[in-house]
Image (cartoon, rainbow, N blue to C red):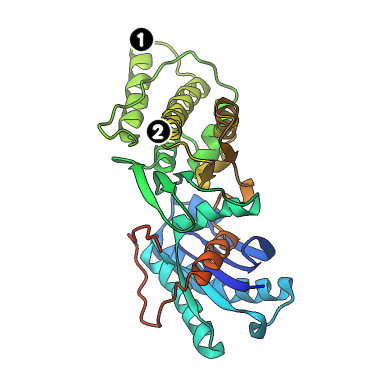
Amino acid sequence: MSLILAIESSCDETACAIIKDGNQILSNVVSSQIDTHKKYGGVVPEVASRLHVENITIVIEEAMESADVSMDDIDAIGFTLGPGLIGSLHVGNQAAKTLAMIYDKPLVPIHHISGHIYANKFVNDIEFPALALVISGGHTELVYMKEDYQFEILGTTNDDAIGEAYDKVARVLGLPYPGGPQIDKLAKTGKANYKLKIPKVEGKYDFSFSGLKSSVLQLIARIERSGEAVINADVAYAFQETALDSLIAKTCLAIEDYQPKHVLLAGGVAANSRLREKMGAVDKKYPNTKVTIPPIKYCTDNAAMIGASAEIAFNKGVRCTYNASSDSSMDLLSY
C-alpha cells in the first residue's frame, strides 16, 4: 500500500489530494479562482500566484483532515513541477519541499499532462499500448504510450491549443470567461446553418486552431455585410463541430496507424459534452480498442490526477532534490 500526498498549482486551481495505491481517492480538495479571474476575462498570473499563497495551507490541511491521515502515514509527496504559470508553480513547489523537509519524505516531481492522462486510472486500469488525446487551454496533443510512463508525442498544435481557441471565439461572441463551457452550452441550441473548414496542417497528427478563429471572424463579417442577423448559437455550433471533428479525425487516424488497446481522453476540454458524445462513437467504431473518458470533475485541474501519476513515478524511483526548479515549459518526460 502507498499513500501519496499530491499538490497541484499550475494555473488557477490550488489543490491537494491524498491518493491510496494510485487509484483510490481518500480526499481531493480544490480551491478554484475562476470567479476572481472572470472579472478580467482570463487568468491573471500575478493574481493567481497570490491566491495560491493564500490558499495552499488551507487545502493541504483540509485534504489531510478529510482523508483522516497524518504526515507519518504519507509515503511520498507528489507535486506539479511544470508546465504552467511559473508563479503558480512556485507556490506548490515550495509547499511540497517544505513538507518533505520537515517530515523527511521523498519528493516526486510530476508533469502536469501526465496527471491528466493518469486521471483515467480512476475509471479503470490503463491497457498498453495506449493513445491519449490531451486537450486543454494550453495543450492539444496526441500522446502514444507503449507502457507506463513512456510518452511519445505523435502530434501537437501548430498554434493555439483548442481550449485557447474556445476562449477566443467566446470573446468574439460576447460570452463570458471561461469560453469552453459557454460555447458548449450555446451550441446545443444551434443549427448547422453555417459552414467552417477544418484548418489544414502538414504534420499527419498535428492540429491548428488559430485559422479556425479567423474563419469565425470572417464568417461573422460576411453575414453582417449581407444585412442578415448573426445567429450566435449557429456560429457556436459551427465552430464546435469543426474544432471537435478535427480532434476526432486525427485521433481515428492514429488509432488506425498504431492500433492501441486503449484510448484515453485527458484535459479540461475533455469535459465538453459534445466531444464526449463523439468519443462514444469512436468507441463503437473500433470495437477492439477500449475508450475511457474520465469523470468531469477529474478533467479540470485537480491534485488527485497528480497523485495517480505520482504513484507510478514513485514506484519507478522518480525523485527530485530540494533544488528542483519549477519549469513553465517542461517537456513530457519518459522514465
Determine the residue positioned at 44% across, 42% down.
Answer: 163
262 w.r.t. 27: above or below? above
In-front residue for pair 160/37: 160
Residue type at tag 2: Asp
Labels 2 and 1: the sequence-earlier one: 1
Determine the residue positioned at 58% across, 38% down.
Answer: 291
Disc 2 versus disc 1: nearer the observer: 2
Image coordinates for residue 275, horizontal then vertical, percent? 54, 33
5 w.r.t. 255: above or below? below
Image quarter where the N terminus lies is bottom right
In the rendered structure, find residue 292 and report the number of the disc placed on it: none
Image quarter where the C terminus lies is bottom left
- The secondary structure type at the circle numbered 2 is helix
Query: Badge 2: few (under 14), some or many (20 or more) residues near its Cα, within 10 Å?
Result: few
Q: State left or right for residue 160 relative to residue 281.
A: left
Query: Badge 1: few (under 14), some or many (20 or more) residues near its Cα, within 10 Å?
Result: few
In-front residue for pair 289/158: 289
172 w.r.t. 233: above or below? below
Image coordinates for residue 17, horizontal then vertical, percent? 62, 67
Determine the residue positioned at 51% across, 71% down.
Answer: 314
Determine the residue positioned at 65% across, 77% down.
Answer: 61
Residue type at tag 1: Ser
Image coordinates for residue 205, horizontal then vertical, percent? 34, 35
Image coordinates for residue 281, horizontal then vertical, percent? 58, 27
Q: What residue does disc 2 label? A: 257
Q: What residue does disc 1 label? A: 226
Q: State left or right for residue 5 relative to residue 107.
A: right
Q: CA–CA distance between discs 2 and 1?
A: 45 Å
Mark 2–mark 1 CB contact (< 8 Å): no
In-front residue for pair 313/139: 313
